[in-house]
Image (cartoon, rainbow, N blue to C red):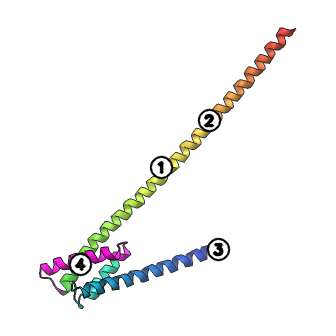
Amino acid sequence: MKKLFLVVGLVIGFVAFAYAQSASEVAKQVTTELQDSGVITAQDAPSVSSSVKTLVKSGASADDAKNIVARAAHQAKAQGLKGKELAAKVHEAVKARKAQLDEVKKKAKEEKRRAKQVEKEVKEAERKAKKASEETEEKTREEHQKAGKEANKGKGKGKD
């Protein structure tokens, strides 16, 4: 049993490492695409990359992250922001989207909990219905046996 837990722990560790590595790679790819398309500059890339990585770790797809960062960068440029101010605007947008994703996850988790509760209640109701059915069958059986005994007693008295 200990070996099983050890193996499961190792697998989870490898998956977590692969996921973290993939988030970094996705962030790098998205940042490069944004830089190549002229949405951000080379100076903005490192700070924007960390924001993209945050989004991806939160569950956003690469396209979603790219769109959010691009929209925030365009808005920042329209306001005349550059460098750290632009990065701050992007980070602000990422923070807002991350909060939305977290809220969605929270709601999904709550719905899953509710579904489990309903499933538990259904199983309990089925168990009670089965028990009631068995009790009814038992009472019916007993009544039939009692009626049969009484009928047999009545037949026996009539023959004497």
**Identity, as a three-letter code, of the amino acid under mark 1:** Val
Quarter holding the C terminus?
A: top right
Residue range in magenta is 55-82
Crowding around mark 3 (Cα neighbors within 10 Å: few <14, some 14 to 19, many 20+) is few
Crowding around mark 4 (Cα neighbors within 10 Å: few <14, some 14 to 19, many 20+) is many
State the predominant SS element of the stretch in magenta. Answer: helix
Find residue 92 and report its horizontal and vertical position in percent: 24, 75
**Identity, as a three-letter code, of the amino acid under mark 2:** Ser
Q: Is residue 31 left or right of residue 112?
A: left
**Identity, as a three-letter code, of the amino acid under mark 3:** Lys
Find residue 128 and report its horizontal and vertical position in percent: 58, 40
Nearer the observer, disc 1 or disc 3? 1
Q: Which residue is mark 2?
A: 133
**Identity, as a three-letter code, of the amino acid under mark 4:** Ala
Q: Earlier in the sequence, mark 1 or mark 3?
A: 3
**Residues at discs 1 and 4 in contact (Cβ within 8 Å):** no
Q: Earlier in the sequence, mark 1 or mark 4?
A: 4
Find residue 70 and report its horizontal and vertical position in percent: 23, 78
Q: Give the spatial CA distance, label 1 vs label 3.
A: 34 Å
Q: Give the spatial CA distance, label 3 vs label 2.
A: 44 Å
Nearer the observer, disc 2 or disc 4? 4
Q: Is residue 3 left or right of residue 77?
A: right
Residue beneath the point at 62% across and 39% down: 131
Q: Which residue is mark 3?
A: 2
